[in-house]
Amino acid sequence: MSETKNNVKTAPKTGKGPGGGGPGARMPAEKAKNFWPTVKRLLKYMSGRSIAILVVFVLAIAATVFQIQSPKVLGEATTKIFEGFATAMKLRMSGVADAPITIDFDAVKTILFTVALLYIGSAIFSFLQQFIMTRVSQRTVFDLRRDLKDKMNKVPMKYYDTHTNGDILSRAVNDMDNIANTLQQSLTQMVTSLVMFFGVLYMMLTISGKLTLVALATVPLSLIVVGIVAPKSQKLFASQQKTLGLLNNQVEETYSGHVVVKAFNREQASIDVFEKENEKLLNVSWKAQFISGLIMPLMNFIKNVGYVFVAVLGGVAVANGTMTIGNVQAFLQYTSQFSQPITQLANLMNTIQSTVASAERVFEVLDEAEMNDEPSNIPAVLNSPSKVSFEHVQFGYGDRGADLLMTDFNLEVKKGQMVAIVGPTGAGKTTLINLLMRFYDVSGGSIKYEGVDTRDMTREELRQHFGMVLQDTWLFNGTIHDNIKYGNETKAGEDHILEAATAAHVDDFVRKLPHGYDTVLNEDASNISQGQRQLLTIARAFLADPDVLILDEATSSVDTRTEILIQKAMRKLLEGRTSFVVAHRLSTIRDADNIIVMNHGSVVETGTHDELMAKNGFYADLYNSQFSEEIAI
Amino acid sequence: MMKLAKRMSLWVVLGAVFFMIIQVISDLYLPTLTADIINNGVAKGDTDYIWQVGFKMLGFSLISIAAATGNVLLASRESQKLGKTLRSDIYKKVSNFSNDEFDQVGTASLITRTTNDVVQIQNVVMMFLRMMIMAPIMLIGASFLAYSKDAQLTKIFIIVLPVLAIFIGLVMVFAVPLFKSIQKKTDKLNLVFREGLTGIRVIRAFNRSNYEADRFKEANQDYTNTAIKVNTIMSFMLPVMTFIMSATNIAIIWNGGHYIADGTLEVGNLISFMTYAMQILMSFMMLSMVFVFVPRGQASAARINEVLDMESKINDPKTPAQLPTTKQGTLDFNHVDFRYQGAENLALKEIDFHAKNGQVVAIIGGTGSGKSSLSNLIPRFYDVESGEIKIDGIDIREMKQHDLRNRVGFVPQKAVLFTGSIRDNLQYGKKDATDEEIWKALEIAQSKDFVSELPDGLDTFVEQGGGNFSGGQKQRLAIARALVKQPDVYVFDDSFSALDFKTDAALRKALKPEIKEAIVVLVAQRISTVVDADIIIVLDEGQVAGIGTHQELKETNVTYQEIISSQLREEEIA
């Protein structure tokens, strides 16, 4: 299928591949196209848990309110202490030299007790809130992931042919992570930040309107930092990320091609290019780090300015007797809490935007058209003499009717016959397999299996009759046993598996492995050889025991002995079955009952070897150039 | 890590520390001034004094931000500069690595070491120059000031700090293994999803969509459960931390109140003590972050050091041989033995053959027979264990690698193209190659047709990894690239197997007249590719199983016959 993929370039929207890291949090937000509809849809995903979310919000608000209250109450304790102190001072100044400092410790105790309760309450509430939110967000993303996976089973093959795996994976991995993190953190952070901002504002107002105005005066300063410096740092980070990406690409390229770099004496040239890029990276990266590093000290400075003015004005007010010392202390604490929600909200705006963009990309996949089942309305032929037949088949990969590759293809295959498919690389041999297996549906005409149009069966029903052994030996990360069993889960008794393994010459080499059938194939199944992988896929097909077999003869190289085993196993597998073989061997095409010759994606000729040779057309030409040399040996 | 850090300028680091100390001192001085306002201004009702101290505070804030700016500037410049130097050092080092080192570390790992590991180090250094030196300075400064404000109250820390330490320790003990396991489970989740993508045809052909869905659900559930566990532990973190700090505040006020009643503490000092207490706890927590970041950086540093400490085993001779002005045009393998580093068995044993200009030497054999190893010896990607390889009568180990590789045109098994135009790629071996030369090479390599059909011709952009060309096209371009170079010895390491029979044959036919003045070493899998070679070497498990022409070998050599029979059936041989 790689042939068709070459022409389709889908630019992966997120630059990062799976696993690609980087300080993602500081990346500038990607804008979502439909912000609110996507938000609504994401929220709908959580609607099953709306009560829990409501509880989370209530808890978050409660925790924040409790937290906001405590400085003021704690301030009262200080006031009580100060009052005792001040009274004693006054007494001493008025002559009572050793007037004791009498502090109302009972009152202080009650106040501190209240504060402790507030703290405990706040801690418990915020723990509970996190506890519930973790479950809500993780389960929501669990659902989302499950739906995405289910969707992958429902989209037509075309989707896979027009989207790169990298693009799909980046949505399933990076975007999903992004959503999970935001749901976990940002939602409650937004609520607490808002409550915090207004709550602190309210508390400050209850203490002193004048001081509140002073504190509020720092807000525009914070906004300037948030609004000017932060976007600038994001821009620099984006360009740092881009330059780093380019540099990494170069490293990847020259390291993987180091043999060529060396063979052509290009080491110095590649170092020169690298140094230039490296210098460029330094130029943007230190600026990015510098500007972003400044944000915190700047916010701190603004906070300090507010702090100083509050301290001074508060001090004056206490000196004048218009404010209590505890209130000033509380107010100072409020001042330092005041700038925090502003910075946090600004950061959240970015995170939320990029999350919505992520969610949009995930929903885009969920909205892809699914495979549809339209009945063919072609009556079934009872007791059809043919096993598989193509009748006036039209097909093109484009949308219905556009760019037809097959305009009127006819073929009848009787039970037990072998059809060879030949053609140069890129001729579209996979197209035929695609149609047979109903990976794609025909644009016109009909393909029948035992007289019934394949569109009138479910895909599952149809595929039960077919087995496939492709060159691309797909095995998954599991035991050898499970990989064989994959061929037929329903009938897979242990004896059947062993039988299939023996027939495919798998048994011999598996027994030599230290863990035998329980050997776990690693990620790219590189712990067994290419030839052994091929044998495993044959074993799988034996176990499936299909009526019709689709077989792709290997062109890739395996060692001589394994090659002989593969051929033996394949021949055994073909016995007594109707088969379609993508042929690379002379013997196969000679033995074939029918040959389909393909070129440029469409069928150019069909017939037996002798018929086609007599025609002296494309096949004869192909045969003479490709296979005659073998005879010459 | 220290070893890598030596690349930084000590002065700059000291500068960063200096600025940080100023910043921390001015930050710490603010609470003292607040205490001053309360003790001497508020308590005495002296508004002028309050204003005076207020301006002082403002002044300190300004000093603090100026110092912070200085620190950030030095920290960010120096950390990024260190990154640049490291990257450059590693890249230069790796450029001189021989295949042995590449095999030893692995290409993928070398890439991560040059990219991710360096970024990791940069981040840690940046963190270090800012956060990590701040924490101890702050901790010491705040403790000192707190102590000077009131010694009795510091007793509280004897209880609080151990509690905090135990709590942080506990969270780490529980969370760190879970973090590791969640990483594993993420990988598993991604693996299953990716397998679902790559195997989609097989999955659908065998009707296994439901099975796949179950497999994914299992991984998904497993991941979700662990993620919930991790986050639940983390949910303890913040509330408990806040609570510990708040409890400290309460304790300070309660005890402080009594000290005030006893007349041993001033009210203003109580308030500034509370601020210092918070700073102590904060810097303590910051310090605990060191335990998270430093090991991470340490692991990266170890990996980078491993690369930097590695020495290439293949080096130029001290007195390289002068190349003769007239070429003899010979290639000799004299009893060559070769072994991969650390391998038990020889990869090649007793390889002995001699070729001269105009000859084609074909090497055939099964996988693992040593074909590629042999071809890699010619450009000296590896050194022989014993015996010698000579070009024009000179041992290749006595030549400069640069001179040797100038004379060898190597086409690797896996076609490698670089980002850039087709022209850039073809000029790789000869910078000043004209378009005419390039087209000629393309014609021989059977690529003229497809390249001229491209709208941009030679200017067509080659994407990374040659992604916009098919395997066969890439291979043909790689062959053309070697042809442009016009070397004395061509080495085709199984370069023809990606081509179909027809192209393979046409290419070899076109190549024939071009190589009269050169020696061709051709590694192949297919009998048809080697049929016309002047010398065919049949390799079996690293040893020469036969040497001769096709006709000779076909009649006498068992291994060769086996290869033939595996590729053709009886009747076709006949």
Image (spheres, rainbow, N blue to C red):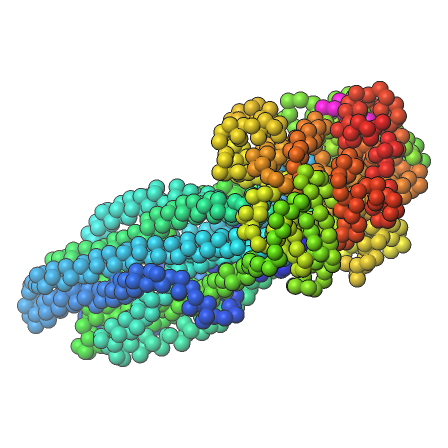
Image quarter (top left, top right, bottom left or bottom right) of the C terminus of chain A: top right
Q: Residue placed farthest to the front in the image?
A: A382
Indicate the position of residue A334 as horizontal and vertical percent values.
28, 68
Whole-percent x and y of residue B70?
Answer: 48, 61
Residue shown at the point (82%, 26%) measured from the top left: B537
Which span of residues is magenta-colored?
B537-543
Q: Is residue A625 left or right of residue A285?
A: right
In the picture, measured across the screen, residue A603 lies left or right of residue A297, that is right
Q: Main secondary structure of the magenta part?
A: strand
| Residue in front for this viewpoint, A183 or B496 | B496
Compared with residue B121, is residue A589 higher up or lower down, i.e. above or below? above
For the question of whether residue A409 can be seen, the reply is yes
Q: Residue at x 43, y 66 (%)?
A: A41
Q: Position of residue A92 (x, y in %)?
A: 9, 68
Question: Would residue A598 be counted in the magenta stretch?
Answer: no
In the image, residue B509 lies at what x, y percent? 89, 41
Q: Nearer the viewer, residue A1 or A105?
A: A1
